[in-house]
Image: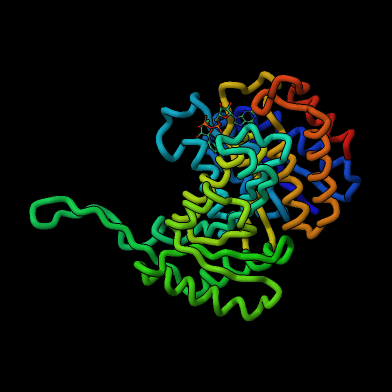
């Protein structure tokens, strides 16, 4: 197992250090090598995704990433922005499937802006296609027409693109509660009618998974009305962009949410859903749990080590039940700890 570790900027190094400690504690045979990405790579190598990092990432089975960015690099030209490093590595590794779980542990139900009974125990997974759709479709642009400017983009999905993301979603559903909801806008968009047709066709290969369909506007409503009705949701790039952010905010605790971006050979990039939190960087107070849970996703999706993934997830549940909280999830009556102490607590629970 070869893992490329890219701590990045801001709180990135602090939180990845804890995830690395947790991975090492499992006693598995794994090689880990660190590289630079984002602002720190711009400073050291003049580019956010240097060649040495590209080589490391390509040769690894999986990449564990912290976060990139910060005010120091905000005024850089576009190609030297830290976020370019992130786009670069996603494209380079052909990571077309983005998996974002939104889990609300019962102990943190008060962190959500929704009523605790609506969200307590929430556990959904959004599978978003990441490399196609209107974000990449051609033609695109702004042109002059009849004396005014007209903006246009193209929503486009090929059958093979829909099939490969569909398979990822059906496989993910198989590892969970075996229910998959495909989200589209087939009543208006031909492109998403094709999406629905392909999902129905794919379902024949997964008789153990119950497939349903929902229009995206209804899905947005249902996510805030009754989010616990969902197990796995699969959708295109643009709808997924919006719905996955909506779903993550149901939990109200950004420091808890992991993510995975996969290619078609189970190689993956694993990172927390949050950014580099420059406001708290270097203070030792960041919540490392999203990154630790990202490491669990790595074990599950790239290495097929379900048992070890569950061990980490159970350890996280245990530390929450024991009352350990970093500042972002702190409530009076719980035990406020820093990044390293939270890592220690997870190790002890393991
Ligand atoms: P952010 O997620 O970094 O921070 C938003 C708020 O959440 C801040 O108050 C921060 O302190 C808090 N927060 C985030 N993660 C936390 C954690 N683990 N523990 C405790 N508190 C946490 O978003 P932002 O402030 O909009 O962006 C900051 C920088 O991060 C920007 O440069 C942005 O471009 C970058 N960014 C990077 C990624 C990524 O690397 N994937 C994603 C989003 C933003």
Looking at the figure, which quarter contains the N terminus?
Answer: bottom right
- Name the one closer to the observer, 150 or 95: 150
Please determine whether, in this image, residue 157 is positioned above or below residue 63: below
Q: Answer whether residue 35 is visible to the viewer in this image.
A: no
Residue 314 visible, this angle: yes
Q: Which residue corresponds to the image point at 44% horizontal and 74% vertical from the top-left?
A: 194
- Give residue 274's position: percent from left, percent from top: 59, 37
Q: Nearer the viewer, residue 342 or 208?
A: 208
Q: Is 223 located above or below residue 202 in the figure? A: above
Residue name at image x 61 percent, y 50 percent: 100
Give how far across and how far down residue 97 sits, in percent.
58, 59
Q: How is the image coloured?
A: rainbow
Q: Quadrant of residue 181?
A: bottom right
Foreground pick, 325 / 33: 325
Which residue is drawn at the image coordinates 69% and 34% (left, top)?
Answer: 108
Q: Is residue 208 above or below residue 16?
A: below
Quarter of the image where ligand 1 sits: top right
In this rendering, the answer to whether 1 lies above or below 339 is below
Where is the C terminus found, in terms of image quarters? top right
Residue 6 location (% of width, % of height): 67, 40
Q: Is residue 304 left or right of residue 96?
A: right
Instruction: Report which quarter residue 33 is drawn in.
Output: top right
Which residue is located at x 62 percent, y 35 percent?
Answer: 253
Residue 296, percent across and down? 76, 48
């Amino acid at each position: 197992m070869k893992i490329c570790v890219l701590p990045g900027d801001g709180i990135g190094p602090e939180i990845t250090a804890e995830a690395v400690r947790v991975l090492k504690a499992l006693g598995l045979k794994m090689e880990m090598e660190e590289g630079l990405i984002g602002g720190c790579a711009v400073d050291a190598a003049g580019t956010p995704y240097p060649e040495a990092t590209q080589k490391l990432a390509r040769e690894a089975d999986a990449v564990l990433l912290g976060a990139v960015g910060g005010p120091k690099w905000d005024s850089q030209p576009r190609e030297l922005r830290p976020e370019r490093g992130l786009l670069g590595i996603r494209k380079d590794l052909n990571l077309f499937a983005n998996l974002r779980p939104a889990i609300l542990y019962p102990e943190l139900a008060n962190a959500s802006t929704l009523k605790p009974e609506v969200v307590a125990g929430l556990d959904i997974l959004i599978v978003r296609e990441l490399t196609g759709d209107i974000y990449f479709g051609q033609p695109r642009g702004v042109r002059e027409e009849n004396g005014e400017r007209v903006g246009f983009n193209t929503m486009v999905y090929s059958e093979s693109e829909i099939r490969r993301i569909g398979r990822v979603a059906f496989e993910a559903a198989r590892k969970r509660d075996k229910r998959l909801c495909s989200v589209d806008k087939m009543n208006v968009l031909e492109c998403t009618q094709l999406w629905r047709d392909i999902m129905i066709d794919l379902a024949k290969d997964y008789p153990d998974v119950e497939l349903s369909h929902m229009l995206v506007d209804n899905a947005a409503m249902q996510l805030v009305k009754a989010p616990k009705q969902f197990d796995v949701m699969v959708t295109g790039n643009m709808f997924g962009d919006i719905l996955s952010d909506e779903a993550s905010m149901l939990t109200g605790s950004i420091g808890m949410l992991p993510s995975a971006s996969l290619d078609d050979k189970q190689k993956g990039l694993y990172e927390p859903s949050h950014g580099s939190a420059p406001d708290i960087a270097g203070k030792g107070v960041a919540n490392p749990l999203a990154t630790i849970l990202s490491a669990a996703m790595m074990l599950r999706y790239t290495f097929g080590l379900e048992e070890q993934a569950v061990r980490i997830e159970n350890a996280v549940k245990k530390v929450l039940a024991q009352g350990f909280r970093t500042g972002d999830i702190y409530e009076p009556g719980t035990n406020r700890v820093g990044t390293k102490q939270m890592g220690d607590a997870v190790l002890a629970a393991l």
